[in-house]
Amino acid sequence: MKSFDYVRPTTVAEAIAAMASPGAAFLASGTNLLDLMKTGAARPGRLVDITRLAGLDRIERLADGGFRIGALVRNADLAHDAAFFRAFPAVAEALLSGASAQLRNAATVGGNLMQKTRCAYFYDPASACNRRDPGSGCDALEGENRLHAVLGWSPSCIAVHPSDFCVPLVALDAAVEIEGRDGRREIALEALHRLPGDAPARETGLAPGELVTGLHLPASAAAFASHARYLKLRERTSYAFAVVSAAAALDIEDGTIRAARLALGGVAAKPWRARAAEQDLAGASPGPAAFRRAAEAALADARPSGDNGFKIELARRLVARALSLAARGTPQRLPALPGSPFSSHPGAVS
């Protein structure tokens, strides 16, 4: 591991100023960054420890019914917050389907948003990776790529974003609070992560030195709480990243879908909002035919980036199943295996 400076600021302003040093990186729990540093895939010259910044570890219900979640809130704490679960159950289900309990107890909301791809070629400094080393090429294109992108990829990069948490957040119009040298701003989470194009090393819409300080979920998203699920298919049920995943939320009245929200994970370099499918579902009667049409619309632009054509049909089926589960209604308690298609029926002991 490369030697580095370590600083621990006490205010957001101090943290942003400390990032002016070339090669600096923010450090929260380090569940992703430290792994990258150990392999040499990340080599920061300075770590700016933000874990002592006041006010970033709070879950706040806003006057309008929305929520603000500080960037340093632990994933487990958010998932188990009763008021948050009632308002946004699919988000809690996604959180509890990711990683192990030990990691969820350490990992932070902000770190989850900013985590790097788990592409093996990105992690291996001996491999060509345009995301890690711009202009070096992409060994994944001709390598082991069955888990790589089928939407939004380019010849420069076919990696996928690994987050479970971000998928329902994007579906529910979450926004990210950001602070930097030019002050505070807010952007839609959907705009935070970038598709690779010809510049995959630029992974987010953050300017240099900017810090994610919080996350906002609008009160309007709670309208979907009665019919919202997150479903994740992985190669092993425990502690694995998604091969494909889907967050589905429906607003149903008198047997008709008034509005729908749908996003996919494991298919692109960012959580993928399926807006065409949402439009197809609006005004439809919930049922297999409508859900199959929505699944087709969600994957209409998908194409293999290698030995991964199977992911397209797999994602279609997962979307239809997630919509079917959402239509049945949100369980009062999470299933024994949150997010898993192999879980027991809704209402099982969590």
Image: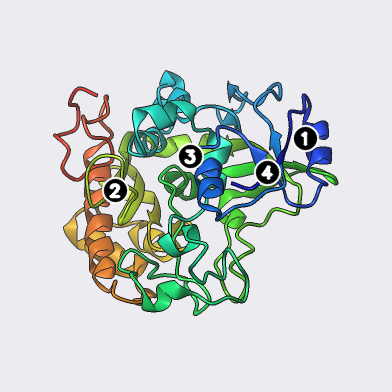
Q: Secondary structure at mark 2?
A: strand
The earlier-in-sequence mark between 1 and 3 is 1
Report if the CB atoms under discs 2 and 4 are less than 8 Å apart: no
Front-most of residues 199 and 187? 199
Q: Is residue 10 above or below residue 318?
A: above
Looking at the image, which residue is at 48% across and 56% down?
117
Q: Amino acid at mark 2?
A: Lys
Q: Quadrant of the C terminus?
A: top left
Q: Amino acid at mark 3?
A: Ala
Disc 2/disc 1 C-alpha distance (Å): 36 Å
**x and y, in percent, of residue 196 in the image:** 55, 69
Report if the CB atoms under discs 4 and 3 are less than 8 Å apart: no
Report if the CB atoms under discs 4 and 1 are less than 8 Å apart: no
Looking at the image, which residue is at 39% across and 75% down?
301
**x and y, in percent, of residue 331 in the image:** 25, 30
Q: Amino acid at mark 4?
A: Ser
Q: From this viewpoint, is residue 120 visible?
A: yes
**Which residue does the numbered mark 3 point to in the structure image?**
221
Disc 2/disc 4 C-alpha distance (Å): 38 Å
Disc 1/disc 3 C-alpha distance (Å): 32 Å
- Classify 10 Å Cα crowding around label 1: few (below 14), some (14-19), many (20 and above): many
**x and y, in percent, of residue 151 in the image:** 42, 70
**Which residue does the numbered mark 2 point to in the structure image?**
232
**x and y, in percent, of residue 227 in the image:** 31, 39
The earlier-in-sequence mark between 2 and 3 is 3
Discs 4/1, front: 4
Q: Secondary structure at mark 1?
A: helix
Q: Is residue 17 above or below residue 158?
A: above
Report if the CB atoms under discs 2 and 3 are less than 8 Å apart: no
**Which residue does the numbered mark 4 point to in the structure image?**
3
- Classify 10 Å Cα crowding around label 2: few (below 14), some (14-19), many (20 and above): many
